[in-house]
Amino acid sequence: RCSLLLAARGSAAATAAAPRVTVGGSASPVPADAADRVVLETQFGVAHPYADALLAGGGFDLWRVSVDSVYFVGGFGVAAQWVDAEEHRGRAEIFFSEKSYTD
């Protein structure tokens, strides 16, 4: 089991005022022969220039989280609520658009 706290990038707001989502679920390593392994390594490499060295060293690996719970906080004083994970699967952008937490 694991949980991850995700926050909007570049938010100028104070930490408590920034929108954020906590996801919970089960984590498992991405097998070396997974169909999407190369894509995941490439995406990780684009985001982190030192990724090749990490992945080649053997002490680091990629993990996949199967999300089963989502808790959305729109910011300080803004609605916080549990969200149906299945209903919003693959739609993370709805949590971090200006409209989602100001309306």
Image (cartoon, rainbow, N blue to C red):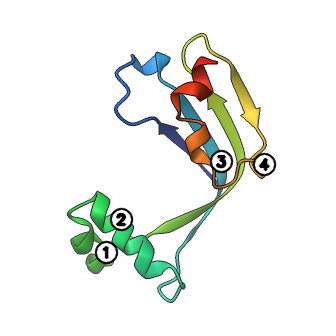
User: Quick one: SS at disc 1?
Assistant: helix
Return the mark for residue 55: 1
Q: Label 3 to label 2, Cα distance in Å?
A: 21 Å
User: Quick one: SS at disc 2?
Assistant: helix
User: Looking at the image, do the residues carrying marks 1 and 2 touch, with CB atoms under 8 Å apart?
Assistant: yes
Select label 3 or label 4 by which is in front: 4
Q: Amino acid at mark 2?
A: Phe
Q: Residues within 10 Å of mark 2 (few under 14, many from 20)?
A: some
User: Quick one: SS at disc 4?
Assistant: loop
Nearer-N-terminus badge (3/4): 3
Name the residue carrying label 2.
44
Name the residue carrying label 3.
24
Nearer-N-terminus badge (4/2): 2
What residue is at 63 percent from the left and 49 percent from the top?
Answer: 91
Q: Nearer the viewer, residue 26 or 89?
A: 89
What residue is at 55 percent from the left and 13 percent from the top?
Answer: 76
**Left or right of 101: which side holds 38?**
left
Q: Label 1 to label 3, Cα distance in Å?
A: 25 Å
**Left or right of 67: which side holds 33?**
left
Q: Residues within 10 Å of mark 1 (few under 14, many from 20)?
A: some
Q: Is residue 60 visible?
A: no
Residue 49: % across, % down: 21, 62
